[in-house]
Amino acid sequence: MSNGGRSSFLDIIIGFLCIILALPIFILVHQQIPNPDWPYHTDRILLMISIILLLFLVIRLFRVLILVGILAACGWLIYGSLNGGYSFNDVYYDYRAMIYGMKDDPNFAGLITNGGSSFPYRREFVTAMDEKSPAVRQFAVSAINEHFKAEQQEFEEYRSIIQSFAIFKKINSHWNYVDDPQSREYFANASESVKLMAGDCDDHSILMAAAIESVGGKPRLIHTTGHIYPELLIGNKNDLEQLNYLIKQKLFVEESNGQSINYHQDGKGNIWLNLDYTAKYPGGPFMKEEILGVMTW
């Protein structure tokens, strides 16, 4: 290849890199500077062009080192693709989720570290969550077969989480709120609620937690003022970035349109999403903000 050909090839690679890097930088800068509201978004167009030109100059200045780095990264990704490790598909999914998360950031609702705090009627809740009941397991598997089957295959890394979302969708789309007797608290077993699809917030939380646990998910219960609701462990901040995209662009598009994903974080950095009966999508708005107790088991 002639010097002119090599130079043109390098310029193409540099241009491609500029476009890939310019988008997240543009989003960050765009969020930090005032919007002058020029006609036809001229200010944003000029900002994007300026970022691309600046990146082009910087990358061209260090093009040899950058080219070596690209070749090394491609080799690593090829190796990962052949051996079940980090692959080109993973790069695409991570980049897509990162870009989406930058423009539609989930809402951090607070740090909850009081897992050992008091929880009213703890024994009754544990007894009612009969997740080993065949009826509960059958209900959970039926929900999983009914919702998001294609996504469970496509996003295998998050298959268990998506299956828990399928259970959430099944329960919340059929749940009918019914009060307890005025004279006492009544805790319906999960195996009872799968037949009735009705009850108060206690019964809903018991069924949601038991059904999710019966297929390997990790739920917990939150006690707030006059209310109990379930949450689901989804992983860490990187997982939240991916699932934010999946919830809003793949699984609950209509339900989450124009809304934010709300989450809590525990002392270990784990992320938990709200699965309350009032939520139309995982991570929906909290009915009550104050946290009085957390039940884990």
Image (tube, helix red, strand yellow):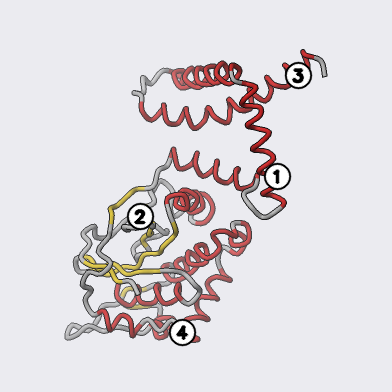
Which image quarter is the N terminus in?
A: top right
Q: Secondary structure at mark 4?
A: loop
Q: Nearer the viewer, residue 60 or 164?
A: 60
The residue under label 1 is which amino acid type?
A: Ile
Reading the chain from its start, which is encountered first: label 3 or label 1? 3
Residue shown at the point (32%, 49%) measured from the top left: 108
Q: Residue furthest right?
A: 1
The quarter of the rendered structure image containing the C terminus is bottom left
Q: Position of residue 139 (x, y in %)?
A: 50, 79
Callout in the foreground (4, 1): 1
> Marks 1 and 2, how far apart in space?
35 Å
**Helix, strand or loop under label 1:** helix
Q: Are marks 3 and 4 in contact (CB under 8 Å)?
A: no
Rounded to the nearest angstrom, the CA distance separating label 3 from label 1 is: 24 Å
Q: Residue at x 58, y 25 (%)?
A: 18
Q: Which residue is mark 4?
A: 132
Q: Quadrant of residue 59?
A: top right
Question: How far apart are labels 2 and 4 at the CA level?
Answer: 28 Å
Give the residue type that dot 4 points to: Lys
- 118 relative to 113, above or below: below
**CA distance for labels 2 and 3:** 50 Å
Q: Which residue is mark 2?
A: 263
Drawn side of residue 14 relative to residue 121, left or right: right
**Nearer-N-terminus badge (4/1):** 1
Amino acid type, residue under disc 2 in the picture: Tyr
How crowded pointer 2 is (Cα within 10 Å; few <14, some 14-19, many 20+) is rated as many
Residue 143, given in percent of the width and then of the height, sits at 52, 72
Residue type, mark 3 in image: Arg
Q: Tell me the SS state at disc 2.
A: strand
Q: Which label is found at residue 6?
A: 3
Q: Mark 3 or 4 closer to N-term?
A: 3
